[in-house]
Amino acid sequence: MTISHDKIAPLVALLDMPQRVVITIHYNPDGDSLGSSLALYHLLTAKGHSVEILAPNTPPPFYGWLPSFGIVRDFLAETAVCVDLIENATMLFSMDYNELSRAGKMEAHLRNAKVPLVLIDHHPDPEDCTPFLFSDTKVSSASELTYQFIRAMYPNDVLSTKVAECIFTGIMTDTGMFQHNSSRPETFRIVADLLECGIDKDKIKGKVFDTSTTDRLRLTGFCLSEKMVVMPELHAGYIALSMAELARFNFQKGDQEGMVNYPLKVDGLCFSALVVESEELIKISMRSKGNFDVNKLMRKHFEGGGHRNAAGGRSYDTLENTVNKLEDVLAMYKAELALTHKDTTEC
Ligand code: 5GP
Ligand code: MN
């Protein structure tokens, strides 16, 4: 997206004076929401603003190495402090989410706020909730758009290595190390600039992708050898995990990260899902290839949403009923899945 001078001029003027900035990110924060918000945090604190980052629930501890990860507050754990921060903010940012409901219990507080709210995101159909909406579904990640936003706001700045590391982490995690949504040359021009700002790409890649616990890796093995269900006639596959199975592998929040991608590696499949049972709900992740739209499917059947090829949702039914429903829903999309399979395999 081209970020016009007219659109950012009021924000440049506002940030010319010290502000109390509160940055919020989406429920179940990921590398992109943490990367984009921490990049903004480092940039704005260096410019003399007071900056807070609020997450709707606990961020995964395996991102603990991100510079200043420790400042991210968990709204559920510190509700009163966080409400106070939002109410006293002079400027709000919403990073990596397209509807205020994705901010969990912070939603009402954000809706009531009377100060400028800047939304930077790359999910489809953004909510029309602010005049400062920066949304582009073509970019790889909210972090890429944050880079463009920062460059537009401060064209003469040299980015600090910390800012660059956070942005790179967001781009790298949302693209799965440049496997998805990363065919635009512009993404690589930005990465080239980040390398020139001094990031150590291999170190960051190692921190994100090569730090599994033994239990986590063994859980992956268990999923692939015992739990992956492949339905060749539907070009679909899924993995469903009960709480008892997770307990066998001392499951920690985030251990399932990336697991949903495995069924898509099977030749002939263009849809995959991961269904994970927990005390409160059943979390569903979906991934697809080509034009098969899991955002729409999630919205219609599993109270969720996301992107065309990556979406999340939930069920409050039993694991067994949820899996049965998933299979029934997929059967309804048989023709569409067959067409996607044809489209994605034809050269
Ligand atoms: P994941 O499967 O990794 O949780 O999510 C995949 C993508 O869908 C991410 O971009 C995530 O932000 C988005 N997403 C996950 N859950 C939801 C949801 O409940 N609603 C919406 N709108 N997006 C979601
Ligand atoms: Mn994202």
Image (cartoon, helix red, strand yellow):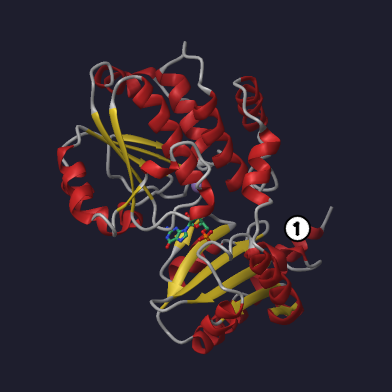
Please state the horizontal and vertical placement of residue 179, each as a whole percent of the image.
Answer: 70, 47
Could one spot residue 1 in this view of the protein?
A: no
- Residue 40 position by quadrant: top left
Residue 330 falls left or right of residue 18: right
Q: Is residue 19 above or below residue 182?
A: above
Q: Say which residue appears at 30% left-offset and 45% top-offset.
A: 128
Q: Is residue 194 above or below residue 235?
A: above
Give the secondary structure at mark 1.
helix
Q: Say which residue appears at 67% left-offset and 62% top-offset.
A: 261
Could one spot residue 103 in this view of the protein?
A: yes
Residue 73 falls left or right of residue 81: right
Please state the horizontal and vertical placement of residue 37, each as a whole percent of the image.
Answer: 42, 38
Q: Say which residue appears at 38% left-offset and 21% top-offset.
A: 46
Q: Which residue is mark 1?
A: 344
Mark 1 vs ligand 1: CB below 8 Å: no
In the image, what residue type sits under mark 1?
Thr
**Count of numbered tags:** 1
Please state the horizontal and vertical placement of residue 103, each as a whole percent of the image.
Answer: 33, 54
Please state the horizontal and vertical placement of residue 152, each as a whole percent of the image.
Answer: 44, 20
Residue 7 falls left or right of residue 156: left
Residue 63 falls left or right of residue 54: right
Category of crowding for the residue at label 1, using alpha-carbon neighbours closer than 10 angstroms: few (below 14), some (14–19), many (at least 20): some
Question: Please, which residue is most extreme toward the right here?
Answer: 347
